[in-house]
Amino acid sequence: MSEASFSRETVRHELAARELRVVRRERLTSSLTRITVGGDQLAGFSALGPEDHVKLFFPSPNGERISRDYTPAAFDADALELSLDFVLHGDDGPASRFASGALAGDPLVVAGPRGSRMPPSGAKSYVLLADEAALPALGRWVAAVGVEAQVTAFVQSDHADVLDYPLAYGNRVTVTAIPTGADAALAALEGPSIDAATYVWAAGEAAALIPVRRALRAGGLAKDRAKVDGYWRKGVAGLDHHAPLDPENPED
Ligand SMILES: Cc1cc2nc3c(=O)[nH]c(=O)nc-3n(C[C@H](O)[C@H](O)[C@H](O)COP(=O)(O)OP(=O)(O)OC[C@H]3O[C@@H](n4cnc5c(N)ncnc54)[C@H](O)[C@@H]3O)c2cc1C
């Protein structure tokens, strides 16, 4: 079998900060809430890649603005509406707090995305692993590749209704809910066959992903055939996802 190409095209976008207003709030699952924002400034918005993210800006007590990263879950170019799905994690984070109380008409500044990384051209199958924070991105992956490629997806959650989240289930897509934490992730990843045409994407709580990345590497998966991304870290506010997944062992 010839090796598939795992190179991923990047499409750049002109950086814009858009001043938008909340249009509606919908509960998707017991822990995920969809906030749809709209406004004329969404003209020209583009988010082509499954892992695209925008920065949302919130006021802080000292008057500065703080930002958090979110996935553009859905965009309606006719209505000029952008939907963002928030985990309501119950901590005092500005993003989670905003989402739990947002009312129609509330302002929200949305910047980006700066660029879109497209799926790898040659992959014929995908193994995807996400917790609830990365579930909107997993949804984007499934929608982007699920018609042509075989997708085996695992969603980590402690909530029984997590698969009520709207995913584009196709004939070649299987999605399984599993418990949170590294052990459950490692056990799930034993299941699907990972061959020369498989791309692996995993995102969620950073510390839980360290053993996952280690196991993938130990299994011989080359760096360009997998992306493991820490979307948040227990006990850390506003994690920079460009920081090493494992600060103790950045090269691991
Ligand atoms: C590329 C990218 C895309 C992302 N897309 C989404 C998305 O679409 N939806 C989404 O919900 N999140 C998404 N995230 C994760 C989100 O940016 C973080 O969870 C962020 O920390 C939330 O900000 P906050 O203000 O609510 O909490 P923070 O102020 O950052 O954190 C406060 C406390 O809450 C904890 N915490 C933060 N997030 C969670 C969580 N999910 N579960 C439990 N505890 C948490 C922190 O550890 C900290 O102790 C994405 C992250 C990245 C890097």
Image (tube, helix red, strand yellow):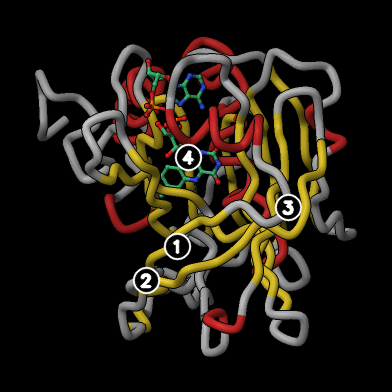
Q: Are marks 3 and 2 in contact (CB under 8 Å)?
A: no
Q: Nearer the viewer, mark 4 or mark 3?
A: 3
Which disc, if any, is residue 202? 4
Residue type beneath disc 2: Ala
Q: Position of residue 120 (x, y in %)?
A: 46, 70
For marks 3 and 2 on the same chain, the one whose residue lies earlier in the sequence: 2
Q: Is residue 245 left or right of residue 38?
A: left
The quarter of the image holding the C terminus is top left
Residues under numbered marks 1 and 3 in contact, where contact means CB atoms less than 8 Å apart: no
Q: CA distance from mark 1 to mark 4?
A: 25 Å
Which one is earlier in the sequence, the residue at label 1 or at label 4? Answer: 1
Residue matched to label 3: 104
Residue 3 versus residue 205: which sits nearer the camera?
205
Could you tell me how far apart the alpha carbons at marks 4 and 3 are, in whole angstroms?
A: 34 Å
Which image quarter: residue 245? Answer: top left
The reply, left or right, for residue 197 in relation to residue 54 is right
**Residue at point 78% right, 70% down?**
147
The mark nearer the N terminus, 4 or 3, is 3
Camera-near label (4 vs 2) is: 2
Label 4 amino acid?
Ala
Q: Which mark is residue 110?
A: 1
Q: Position of residue 205 (x, y in %)?
A: 43, 25
Tag 2 residue: 17
Q: Would you call the spot at circle 1 few (<14 residues within 10 Å), some (14-19), or many (20 or more)? A: many
Mark 1 secondary-structure assignment = strand
